[in-house]
Image (tube, helix red, strand yellow):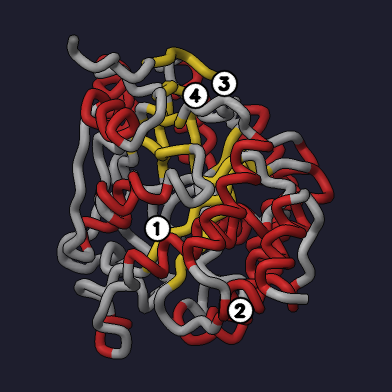
Amino acid sequence: MTLSALCAKASAGERLSPEEGLDLLAHAELLDLAGAANEIRFRKNPEPRVTFHVDTNPNYTNVCTVDCIFCAFYRHPGEEGAYTHSVDAMIGKFRESAAKGVTTILLQGGVNPALPFAYYVELVERTVREVPGVTPHFFSTSEILGMARVAGLTVPEVLRRLWDAGLRTIPGGGAEILSDRVKKKISHLKGSSDDWLGVMREAHRMGYRTTATMMYGHLETDSEIITHLDRVRDLQDEYRGFTAFIPWSFKPGNTPLEKIIPHYATPVRYLKMIAIARIYLDNFPHIQASWFSEGKKTGQIALHFGADDFGGTLQEENVHAAARFVNKTSTEECIEMIHDAGFPAAQRNTVYDILRTYEVPSAAA
């Protein structure tokens, strides 16, 4: 089948095989992918609006024993600069964020074996009780696996106790590339692809809503990118628990992997990732563009390559900052960027319920 026929097949709503997806990723022209991806985007989300949410991404600890070579954020136990904040301190941060209009708190940290499971349960319970205006979007799969090891519980038991405490959504961090060849090279202590998928499967079975992520631009091949997309698409078929797919490129600054991969992936590569994700992930409702990880202009352009969401305002972020990559925005600028890209803006919550809309201002007479 020709590349144009493959794009037409995807635009018509037909599922692509891994071989067809790889053919498009490796050989299709960028603007051909954009056309197919945009057609699919508007079929799934007919409203022309682009959503965003007002969020923050603090960290409760940077202590971690997993030693991912792509990470500049973590510190070993007892190392200079290592920290762990108390539950009281984190609740204070959350209250300050809520007072500034934040509706989602994306909370992650390191895999810290010194923290008891009760710490995490208390964080959720107190957030729900004491900061009711925000959604706790807490804990990556790696942290959940770490909780299970420390507490001597199964993953379903950990997820059930967090659910009973009030947690309902989980971020998709920790996937990187769902290839065990890559994981053995960049995060060999973190667990396998099946571990990430297994936590997500159990979470979806219980009713959690989560995101799926992909960090590319390091040691992966095109074939492994399609394998990643294929595996999350297969899991989505089971429970429809993923709300969105979020790709971002590896940031090498201050990381051990910088010695091997010293450069950033290009904006063109990012736009191709957005378009391929929209085309291949036929069962995902939302694809998120990132002004934060790829730069504001690239994020705006991605809204014309199949993305329908612009992520969050990220009032606090420390992981990319540790890698010498910093972008900041405000709610007002986020709305303005969406408008400048040609779309009405809509503020959403964590699970994509619309909270407020902002129409594109009419041109001055």
Cα distance in 3D space between marks 4 and 1: 26 Å
Nearer to us: label 1 or label 2: 2
x, y percent for residue 274: 50, 57
Mark 2 crowdedness (10 Å alpha carbons): few <14, some 14-19, many ≥20: some
Give amino acid for label 4. Asn
Residue annotated with mark 3: 353
Cα distance in 3D space between marks 3 and 2: 33 Å
x, y percent for residue 227: 67, 73
Give amino acid for label 3. Asp
N-terminal of the two: label 3 or label 1?
Answer: 1
Mark 1 crowdedness (10 Å alpha carbons): few <14, some 14-19, many ≥20: many
N-terminal of the two: label 4 or label 2?
Answer: 2
Image quarter of the C terminus: top left
Q: Quadrant of residue 362?
A: top left
Q: Quadrant of residue 26?
A: bottom right
> In this picture, is 7 found above or below 305?
below
Q: Which mark is residue 349?
A: 4
Q: Which mark is residue 225?
A: none
> In this picture, is 321 found above or below 309?
below
Residue annotated with mark 1: 110
Residue 22 vs residue 111: left or right? right
Nearer to us: label 3 or label 1: 3
